[in-house]
Image (spheres, rainbow, N blue to C red):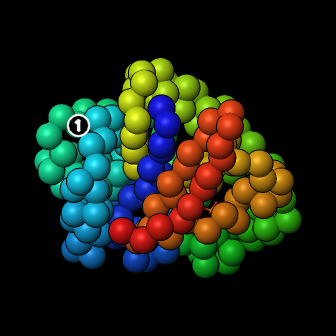
Amino acid sequence: VKNLFLVRHGESYFNLENRIGGDSELTPNGWAQAQALAAHFKQTNIPNIYTSTKKRTVQTARPISEMQKNAQVMQLKEFNEINAGTCEYMSYDEIRREKPEVFYSRTKDKYNYIYPEGEGYVTLKHRVDRGLKKAIYLSGNATYIMIIGHQAVNRMILAHFLYRRKEDVPYIYTPQDRYFHIVSTQSKKLFELKRY
Ligand code: F6P
């Protein structure tokens, strides 16, 4: 694999409500983003596209997989979003009000904080690394691959390729109308945030 296009899923209903986790679908705006993504890559042959098993990433992949002639789309559960345990489905405001101990402990050390009955960035790392290994293996010597993931997952993928201090990883900017183009070989390291 020479080039990785790292995309976050389009806007979901939970994104609109600021709710975390769950398995909500794309909003009309999210579908428009998925269409724009497909149009942007019309001239690029991407044989392997990986998503999580969540609806919002699978739906984001639909237009581009229809436009690409030979694309194989594969769902990897290793790329599912961080499991927020007892806080799944809550908004950040609700967590702050109803579970202040979670809110403040997480704010203090976001990388190492593990949600009750869930995950933290520190544990997510192993799962995402496994997914990446799988994706790279399955893609053989493809020039281009795409991963359509989630906010925390994409931060871990970026951190895998590009050195980042652990404390900074949970704050990497992962907008929904842009993608990261990552080239990581022994001789070349490149990482660009581009609009689609
Ligand atoms: O808000 C969308 C989301 O993907 C949630 O499902 C997830 O818990 C969160 O982002 C991760 O981001 P952060 O670590 O900044 O809360």
**Residue closest to the far front:** 187
Q: Against 64, is 10 above or below?
A: below
User: What residue is at 39 percent from the left and 44 percent from the top?
Assistant: 146
Which quadrant holds the C terminus?
Answer: bottom left
Residue 144 in view, yes or no: yes
Q: Against 187, is 33 above or below?
A: below
Point out residue 99 in the picture as x, y percentages from the top left corner.
70, 67
Point out residue 39 in the picture as x, y percentages from the top left corner.
22, 63
Q: Which residue, given by chain and number where applicable, does mark 1 sit on?
A: 71
Q: Is residue 124 left or right of residue 141?
A: right
User: What residue is at 70 percent from the left and 65 percent from the top?
Assistant: 171
Task: Tell me the crowding category of disc 1: few under 14, some 14 to 19, or many 20 or more residues within 10 angstroms, Cα based.
Answer: some
User: What residue is at 48 percent from the left and 44 percent from the top?
Assistant: 4
**Picture quadrant of ligand 1:** bottom right
User: What residue is at 28 percent from the left and 56 percent from the top?
Assistant: 41
Point out residue 144 in the picture as x, y percentages from the top left corner.
39, 40
Residue 86 in view, yes or no: no
Numbered disc total = 1
Q: Against 166, is 25 above or below?
A: below
In this rendered view, identify the residue nearer to me: 36 or 126: 36
Q: Which of the 4 image quarters holds residue 71?
A: top left
Q: Which of the 4 image quarters holds residue 157?
A: top right
Q: Is mark 1 within 8 Å of ligand 1?
A: no
Point out residue 176 in the picture as x, y percentages from the top left corner.
43, 68
In this rendered view, identify the residue nearer to me: 127 or 186: 186
- What element does badge 1 sit on? loop
Q: Against 106, is 68 above or below?
A: above
* Circle 1: residue type: Ala
